[in-house]
Amino acid sequence: MSTFDDREDRFEQEYKHNAEVQFKVEARRNKLLGLWAAEKLGMAPADAAEYAKEVVMADLDEPGEEDVFRKVRADLDNASTKVSDAEIREQMASLMHIAKEQIRKGE
């Protein structure tokens, strides 16, 4: 039974590790998305950093990424910035790859 317990513990640890990494990747992607949107909004660097934090925090509203999309979409709309839904989603996908690589490298 000890072998089974050891195996179960390893699977639990792997699951926990993968969940932590995924959380970090998504948070990094959201930060990068916030910085991208801030540039579109014409924000100064200090304001852009604060806005990026707001985008990261928006992801805590509900599971999934739709809360982040809605925040960025609403902010761009409020500033009358002409950015399509497709462009936002493309950025989200592209930045997810960049975030994964940054986290993998320990950046």
Image (cartoon, rainbow, N blue to C red):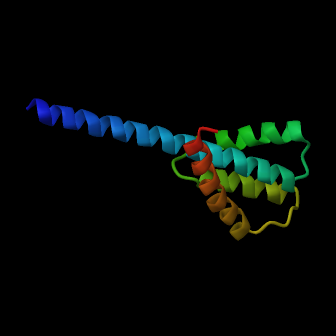
The location of residue 57, given as percent across then percent down, is 65, 39
Rendering quarter of residue 89: bottom right
Residue 88, above or below 101: below
Q: Is residue 59 visible?
A: no
**Count of marks placed on residues:** 0
Looking at the image, residue 39 sits to the left or right of residue 60; the answer is right
The residue at the point 79 percent across, 36 percent down is: 50
Q: Is residue 70 visible?
A: yes
Seen as rendered, the residue at the extreme left is 1
The location of residue 11, given as percent across then percent down, is 28, 40
The residue at the point 73 percent across, 67 percent down is: 87
Looking at the image, residue 84 sits to the left or right of residue 59; the answer is right
The residue at the point 57 percent across, 50 percent down is: 100
Looking at the image, residue 80 sits to the left or right of residue 25; the answer is right
Front position in the image: 62 or 28? 28
The location of residue 85, given as percent across then percent down, is 71, 67
Q: Quadrant of the C terminus?
A: top right
The location of residue 33, given as percent across then percent down, is 71, 51
Q: Quadrant of the N terminus?
A: top left
Seen as rendered, the residue at the extreme top is 2
Residue 12, above or below 81: above
The residue at the point 74 percent across, 58 percent down is: 73
Rendering quarter of residue 14: top left
Front position in the image: 7 or 61? 7
